[in-house]
Amino acid sequence: MSAFSDLLKKLRGERGLTLREFCLQNHFDPGNYSRLERGLYPPPKSHEQIEKYARALGLQEGSEEWLELFDVASAARGEIPRDLLTDAELVKKLPVFFRTLRGQPVSPEKLDQLAELIRRS
C-alpha cells in the first residue's frame, strides 16, 4: 500500500465510518474508493478530487492533516506539491535539497541558503 492509501484509510477509520457508510454519505463510488484505500489506484492527479476527499473526511483547509494528505498524494505520484512549485525562490533551491538527500556533497553556502529559505517559510 502507498502512504496515501494508508492515510486515507486511517483518517476514515478515525471518524468511525465503514467504507460503505463513508462513500454513501459523500457520494463516492465504494468500489473505486476501496481500490484507492487498498493502494490499487494511485492518488488522483486532480487537486479538486483530493480536496473532495479531504472535505469529506472533515479536514480543515490548511490544517496539518489537510497538507499531509496533499503532500503524501504528491509524493506517491512522484511529484513536488503544487503549492511549493509556485515559489520561484524555493524551486531554485530544490536541486541542493535533492543532492543533500542523496548524500552528495553540497557547499556550506548552498546549505545556508536553503536553511534560510526554510526558516522564512
Image (cartoon, rainbow, N blue to C red):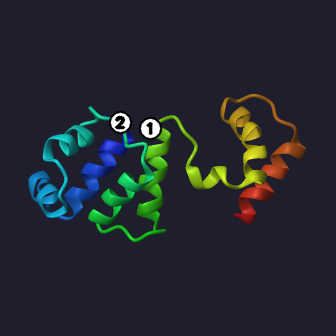
Describe the element under mark 2 as helix, strand or loop.
loop
Residue appearing at x 84%, y 51% in the figure: 112
The quarter of the picture where residue 69 lies is bottom left
The circle on residue 97 is: none
Near-viewer residue (29 or 15) = 29
Residue appearing at x 69%, y 63% in the figure: 121
Which residue is tagged 1?
A: 76
On screen, 6 above or below 20?
Answer: above
- Earlier in the chain: of badge 1 and badge 2, it is 2
Q: Residue furthest bottom?
A: 60
The quarter of the picture where residue 96 lies is top right
Looking at the rendered structure, the kind of residue marked 1 is Ala
- Mark 2 closeness class: few <14, some 14–19, many ≥20 residues within 10 Å: some
The circle on residue 42 is: 2
Describe the element under mark 1 as helix, strand or loop.
helix
Left or right? Give the position of 16 relative to 84. Answer: left
- Mark 1 closeness class: few <14, some 14–19, many ≥20 residues within 10 Å: some
Q: Are marks 1 and 2 in contact (CB under 8 Å)?
A: yes
Residue appearing at x 26%, y 32% in the figure: 40
Mark 1 to mark 2 CA distance (whole Å): 7 Å
Q: Picture coordinates of residue 118 (x, y %)?
A: 72, 57
1 vs 2, front mark: 2
Q: Picture coordinates of residue 13 (x, y %)?
A: 20, 57
